[in-house]
Amino acid sequence: MNPDIQIIASANGAIGIDAVWENLAHGIRALDAVEAAARVVEDNVDDHSVGTGGLPNLDGIVELDASIMDGDNRAAGAVAALRGYRHPISVARAVLERLPHVLIVGDGAARFAQEIGAEAGELLTEEAEKIWSEGLTAAPGGLAGTILERAKALTTDPERAVGTVNFLARDLNGSLASAVSTSGWAWKWPGRAGDSPIPGAGNYCDSRFGSAACTGYGELALRTSTARTIVNRLAEGASPLEAGRSALLDLASLDEPTENMIMHVVVLSKDGEHAALSTQRGALYAWRDGNSKSTEVLERTYVSLEGGH
Ligand code: ASP
């Protein structure tokens, strides 16, 4: 098998890698591989951070963000706050291919999904609704607090609110593609878009240099263009590990409480060298290349932000 083919994902993407690996090995495009892999995770009801089963916003409605990038020409498609459709990654792919736009949101995104015949579905599962309603009641001030107080307390609780799936792939032709899909931070403000649907923030891919994607506190990646920063570093000659480390260290100057400094990145260079890093100890990622016998779930390199930079 050609060792140069490769996929790297957030740990919850391992099932997606397994599902598409044989096809990638047989020559499908990286762009097709990352979309197909993300669809598998979007259908996993046990994953409360992506697609069906994802945790809802403050109003109890699941709103999905997704983006996909073709590294060969940096074509990008994205949707944010999309309600009622099972596969936001495929709607994002259709934006890339069928609209002269990159990002569409909310009602406009749903209207486009309907127009292209995307599959509608009930995204809120019983289990996700239970977690959502228990969280509301347990919020500081409970239901007596103002909605703004609740939004702030709940959406920044890292124990409960996080998760996204990332896929970066390299195909037999050496082309790169990336996909990111998420239900975003649970209890988020309705209409909130995170970093996942924003090329440059949560997702960036350029076959000339490499690709990067994020999970974690999306607002940090939005403020610092994390994925694009990493690819810029690769373009300057940094290794994936050096590029990821410098983008994470850049967060330390944001003047945020340390407990909010949650960022995990995956990085793949054009030559197929990879790295996965996190500001939290023990965070995992999933990976496979042409030499691996199966998908491996491995520990990310920990980057401490303590002490400021
Ligand atoms: N980055 C995602 C967001 O902010 C959530 C996550 O990855 O935990 O919506």
Image: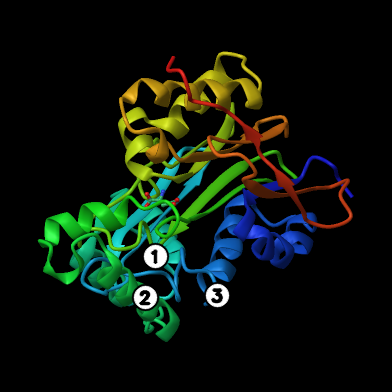
Q: Is 57 on the left-hand or right-hand side of 296? A: left
Amino acid type of the residue tagged 2 in the rendering: Tyr
Residue displayed at 68% across by 60% down: 14
Residue displayed at 40% across by 33% down: 258
**Residue 87: x %, y % from top left:** 45, 70
Secondary element at tag 1: helix
Mark 2 burial class by Cα count in 10 Å: few <14, some 14-19, many 20+: many
Q: Can residue 82 be seen in this view?
A: yes
Counting residues from the start of the chain, the first of labels 2 and 1 encountered is 2
User: 90 or 264, which is in the foreground?
Assistant: 264
Amino acid type of the residue tagged 1 in the rendering: Val
Nearer the viewer's eye, disc 2 or disc 3? 3
Q: Name which quarter of the figure residue 91 lies in.
A: bottom left
Q: Is 85 on the left-hand or right-hand side of 8? A: left
Secondary element at tag 2: loop
Can you tell which mark lies on residue 46? Answer: 3
Q: Mark 1 and mark 2 in contact (Cβ < 8 Å)? A: yes
Nearer the viewer's eye, disc 1 or disc 3? 3
Q: Mark 3 and mark 1 in contact (Cβ < 8 Å)? A: no
Secondary element at tag 3: loop
Mark 3 burial class by Cα count in 10 Å: few <14, some 14-19, many 20+: some
Residue tagged by mark 1?
91
Q: Name which quarter of the figure residue 46 lies in.
A: bottom right
**Residue 59: x %, y % from top left:** 21, 71
Amino acid type of the residue tagged 3 in the rendering: Asp
Counting residues from the start of the chain, the first of labels 2 and 3 encountered is 3
Can you tell which mark lies on residue 189? Answer: none
Residue tagged by mark 2?
85
Q: How far apart are marks 1 and 3 (CA)?
A: 22 Å
